[in-house]
Amino acid sequence: MKKKISRIFCCIVFVVVILSNNIYSKGVKNDIVNDNSVVYPYYRPMTSGFINFYQEYISPANQATCPMYPTDSRYAKGVFREYNPLVAILKTSDRLIRCGNDLTNYDTVNINGFTRYADPVSYDSSVKTILSSNSKQELSMEDIKDYKDISAKLLYEFAKELEVSQEYERAIIEYKRLLSYYPQSQYRINALKSIFNIFYQQEKYIEAISFGKKIIKENDSSADNLDIKFLIGASYFRIANFTLARNYFKELESGSNLELKYKAYLLDGLSFAQQERWDEAKSKFSKVDSSSKLYSIAQKSMYLADNGKYLKYKNPQLAGVLGVIPGLGYWYSGYKKSAMSAFVLNSLFILSAAKSFENNNDQLGVLLGAFGLSFYAGNIYGSVQTAERTNKKIKRDYLLNFKFNFKY
């Protein structure tokens, strides 16, 4: 058993050294550039290799934030560079014990806006300058990347809390701040998706479309993009731009994601129904397979599309002709109270004008006649408009029968 464990341990060490070799080689090249007189001791490949392995593979995954300056791994690099292996091991162990503890015993430094606790390998002149001025110091690219990742993460989490609390406007501001300050952040795509979803929920479909297209452009994962494309198509559907909506639905209809494919068929069919292109609507609904949970909805939609062509609309031209008799055009369209009102008002103006002329009150007769003429013309115009309004209501009420059991 002990031999087996020993072999496993040796294999792990071997793998780590191999992985670290490339990183270590880069470090050696950098040191040679900085100091041609450097002599590399026998232990350097192992110590620097392990530290570089940690910095390259473990630290990014851990995403921990060391409160000390420099970080533990950079401190270890420094002591192995300045001291013999035994002293370096002792100093590294001591640092790991002290890290994050008794911080009031250390001087503070401001590193790119973050407070850190100074514990350098040696207090050379540059460190003393930092401590005395407490100013920003030029950091390595490694430090800058770490701080940016941490700041982006905190900003993203704050924006997400606002979104969960339904403080949507504030959440959008913070997400946009993240996109502006940290354009290369790993949270960028998630921030874009959150903004997209907020705009869609708020029925701000133009804005949602804009951010959805950004996500598709930047995100290489085609699987993740399918849901975004469906909602972009649904956004175009919501603003009645059916042509562009169908462009996105068509792409999903040719894909392998069956759930989105059948949803796309249903919304595509409904877009044709909105335009009263009933045969094309029926054709789309018929493509939903019987194995789908949406099949029964598709069958009902086919029935509705089949009967949609037989909707009984009012004839606006006929309504206008009937309006020659005041109120009759309104009555034809089902507006019975409006019909009575039109008939009474027009009758009163006609009778009043006629009575005024009989009493030789020509001025009043002309005035009442003018008012009566305007109401009479309005009655004919209103009869046509009412018929068209009635037709829209008939269509709208019929389309409400298309009920899908998914959100879009």
Image (cartoon, helix red, strand yellow):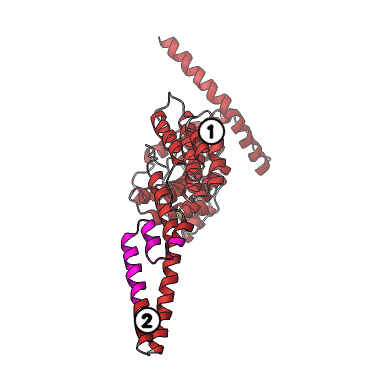
Q: Nearest the camera: 392 or 404?
A: 392
Whether residue 343 is in magenta: the answer is yes
Amino acid of disc 1: Glu
Q: In x, y percent, where is residue 285?
A: 47, 33
User: Label 2 belongs to which residue?
Assistant: 354
Task: Tell me whether the residue at label 2 lies in contact with that at label 1, contact meaning CB atoms closer than 8 angstroms.
Answer: no
Location of residue 367 (image quadrant): bottom left
- Is 19 positioned to the left or the right of 170 in the image? right
Q: Residues within 10 Å of mark 1 (few under 14, many from 20)?
A: many
Q: Tell me if I can see residue 149 in this picture.
A: no
Q: Tell me if I can see residue 241 in this picture.
A: yes
Span colored in magenta = 320-349
Q: Name the element at disc 1.
A: helix
Give the residue at x 63% y 35%: 26
Q: Nearest the camera: 371 or 183?
A: 371
Q: CA distance from mark 2 to mark 1?
A: 69 Å
Give the residue at x 38% y 39%: 403
User: Label 1 belongs to which residue?
Assistant: 253
Whether residue 224 is in magenta: the answer is no
Amino acid of disc 2: Ala
Q: In x, y percent, where is residue 241?
A: 53, 49
Check residue 199 in the rendering and tell me which mark sits there, or answer none.
none
Q: In x, y percent, where is residue 49?
A: 55, 30
Q: Nearest the camera: 42 or 210?
A: 210
Is the N terminus in the top left, top right, bottom left or bottom right quadrant?
top left
Q: Main secondary structure of the magenta part?
A: helix
Is the C terminus in the top left, top right, bottom left or bottom right quadrant?
top left
Residue 66 position (above or below residue 86)? below
Give the residue at x 49% y 59%: 135
